[in-house]
């Protein structure tokens, strides 16, 4: 639309030797929505009775959703605003695949970003364990850092349709 408005301006300016009028029905420019959730808001939380912790540091220039997935289904999904971090407590023991999506303008009904989307799966899985220790129990804390860089651990791109929801 911006290009069409530019062409309309050139043709209407008389710079081409003749002035043309067209494009009056082009819609006016409008601000695109930038809907966001509160950083740390849980999107999905099916299993949470353990002692594990997931800490996420979002160093990217866009918001993200990080998901712990078992058997192809998200067990925990958390929203992390750009440049922010959050912690999810009470993660059950077990192994999880780790996915994330990032983008702009979160559509809560569709459960996806509407612009500048990317969908990634970390190559490694992560696990949480709780073990007895002297004076109590010891549990796992996993720390995930999201960065805009080439060659990180989330090298596998997945399609939006195959992203677990």
Image (cartoon, helix red, strand yellow):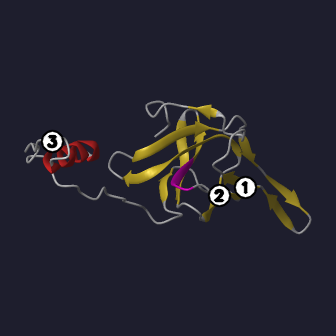
Q: Nearer the viewer, residue 19 or 52?
A: 19
Q: Is residue 63 magenta?
A: yes
- Callout 2 secondary element: strand
Q: Residue at x 41, y 61 (%)?
A: 36
Return the disc, 1 or 3, that comes first in the chain's sequence. 3
Q: Nearer the viewer, residue 47 or 84?
A: 84
Q: Circle 3 sits on which residue?
A: 17
Instruction: Tell me which segment is drawn in magenta.
Output: 61-66
Res. 143 mark: 1
Where 161 sits versus 12, above or below? Answer: above
Q: CA distance from mark 2 to mark 1?
A: 6 Å
- Callout 1 secondary element: strand
Res. 105 mark: none
Q: CA distance from mark 2 to mark 3?
A: 59 Å
Q: Is residue 35 left or right of residue 51?
A: left
Res. 56 mark: 2
Q: Which quadrant would residue 4 be assigned to in this image?
A: top left
Q: Nearer the viewer, residue 20 or 144?
A: 20
Q: Is residue 165 magenta?
A: no
Whether label 2 touches label 1, CB < 8 Å? yes
């Amino acid at each position: 639309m911006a290009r069409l408005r530019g062409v309309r301006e050139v043709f209407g300016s008389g710079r081409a030797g003749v002035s043309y009028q067209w494009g009056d029905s082009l819609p006016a420019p409008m601000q695109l929505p930038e809907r966001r959730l509160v950083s740390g808001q849980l999107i999905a939380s099916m299993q949470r009775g353990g002692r594990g912790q997931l800490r996420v540091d979002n160093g990217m220039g866009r918001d993200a959703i990080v998901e712990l997935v078992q058997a192809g289904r998200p067990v925990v999904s958390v929203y992390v605003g750009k440049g922010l971090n959050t912690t999810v407590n009470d993660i059950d023991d077990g192994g999880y695949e780790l996915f994330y999506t990032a983008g702009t303008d979160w559509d809560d009904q569709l459960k996806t970003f509407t612009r500048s989307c990317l969908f990634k799966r970390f190559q490694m899985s992560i696990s949480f364990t709780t073990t007895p220790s002297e004076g109590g129990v010891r549990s796992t804390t996993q720390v995930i850092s999201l960065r805009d860089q080439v060659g990180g651990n989330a090298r596998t791109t997945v399609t939006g349709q195959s992203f677990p929801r």
